Amino acid sequence: MNSRLTSRAVLLLFADIVFVFLGFVLAAVGRLGLSDAEAWLGDEFTELKIAFAMAASIGSLYVFDLYDFSVISSRREMLVRLIQSLGTTWLFLALIYFFFPQLMVGRGVAALSAPIILMFLLASRVVIHYYLGHPEIGERVILVGSGSSLDEMNYATLKRRDLGYRIVGYVCGEKLNGNRPSSALEFKGRLDELERVIAEEGITRVVVGVSDRRGKFPLDMLLKLRLSGNLSIEESTTYLERITGKVHLDSLLPSWLIFSARPRETRFMQSFRDVSQRLLALVGMMVSFPIALLTAIAVKLDSRGPVLYKQTRVGKHGKRFVLLKFRSMRTDAEENGAVWASEGDDRITRVGRIIRKLRFDEIPQFWNIVKGDMSFVGPRPERPEFVAKLAEAIPFYEYRHLVPPGLTGWAQVNFPYGASVEESKKKLEYDLYYIKNQSLSLDLVILFETFKTILFGRGSR
């Protein structure tokens, strides 16, 4: 499951709901007095007004990444994001109240509630940050192995403190002592001392490097501890997948993918997913028609050439199809062959730069979804010229064609535009994570994250 959806984020969501509601209650008491506030709050329509304002507040907090602690590096940044979020909420509500004044909670209550809610939300997140950063709180993890893989796990764990893991150090075999990691990880002992280290350090989770589990290894001791229910034991590949939200190719074994992949999807669910996506795409075409019409006119007026750009892409099981986009480049952009787009690419037209930023150039792909060439969520379809090159250079690359390509995907919301073999390799790690963990809940997360990506113009070229 998506590493962003932690139990702490869910708890924080419920805390925010309580604090936002409490903010309105205290504001009503301060503005109206206790007796009048009680009468005001007892009105059913008042509850609806507060619920609407709460929904707007929670949605804005999500848009500004205030449920993802990995992006909040300091209290100053947290305060800035909170002010931006609440400011956006109040601007949005002001616009709604202008057209629907019956939804207004009252100017006095609204104005007084803003600083109260800000203080509550800031205080709750400061407490959460302290809780997440406290060295004595969370699962205590010992790493088994050596070298750069330990550095990678330590770095990923420190970056995602919100998951509640605390790496206390590492153990390794006697022959590996000269190949210790470069990070500040503390060496706790040799492999044959693992049981002592587990007992003394209060370890609750053991993470074993994939390359370090083949030689001398205390299987009997770990099996006894695991079956006793006192210890969680897992491979580094699984641990890193949960921490980072991607599959790490450098340490990936085919057997791990075979035995840990998602359950087989029934034919009924496959058919339901296919039909529902096509119907949603039809709705998307109708809703986006005004934007599509304005975009087509702007493209035509800005530069010579067709409004739509047709390009061959590789879909499920390697089947090729024609992908549709609004043209965003000059007509002679690829007269010398296929080339990846780059930052500040001079082949992009003036209108093209805008519609790429807003993702309006992707609107015609609703038709590709209706036809069954694509789905809403999945790995982005690549061009055949690039697929042949990337399949030779990157292991497991062809596996991304096991599912239909998507209008958006897990790689798109986690990694910027890939314009090289190395960047494509990093994007493949996210694509493999999606293929392995594909579910309706993950699809919904990706769609919500895509909305934020479009809103803030991330990742486009």
Image (spheres, rainbow, N blue to C red):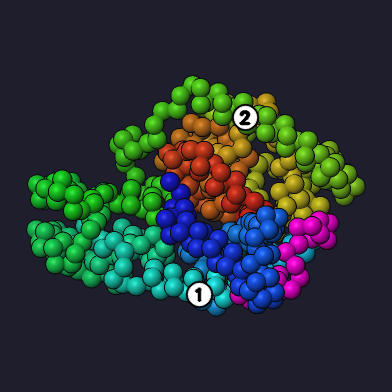
Number of marks drawn: 2
Q: Is residue 91 visible?
A: no
Q: CA distance from mark 2 to mark 1?
A: 43 Å
Q: Is residue 249 above or below residue 316?
A: below
Residue 412 in the figure: left or right of residue 194: right
| Predominant SS along the magenta part | helix
Instruction: Give the quarter of the image for residue 280.
Output: top right
Residue that protrudes farthest toward the top in the picture: 267
Residue 222 locus on image (x, y percent): 14, 50
Q: Which residue is mark 2?
A: 276
Instruction: Judge whether 414 appears above or below 21 on screen.
Output: above
Instruction: Indicate the secondary structure of the residue bearing disc 2.
Output: helix
Residue occupying image coordinates x 60% and y 46%: 447
User: What kind of residue is marked 1?
Assistant: Ala
Nearer to the camera, 167 or 229: 229
The verdict on residue 105 being magenta is yes
Identify the image quadrant of residue 106. bottom right
Residue at point 58% right, 54% down? Answer: 416
Tell which tag, 2 or 1, sits nearer the viewer: 1
Question: At 61% across and 37% down in the image, what residue appears?
Answer: 376
Query: Helix or strand or loop: what does disc 1 sit on?
Result: helix
The stretch in magenta equals 97-116
Residue 59 position in % (x across, y down):
62, 57
The residue drawn where x is 50% and y is 75% is: 123
Q: Position of residue 334 (x, y in %)?
A: 72, 43
Residue beneath disc 1: 123
Amino acid type assigned to the residue bearing label 2 in the image: Ser
Q: Pinpoint residue 85: horizontal percent, then vertical percent.
A: 64, 66
**Is 361 colored magenta in this rendering?**
no
**Looking at the rendering, in which quadrant would you find the C terminus?**
bottom right
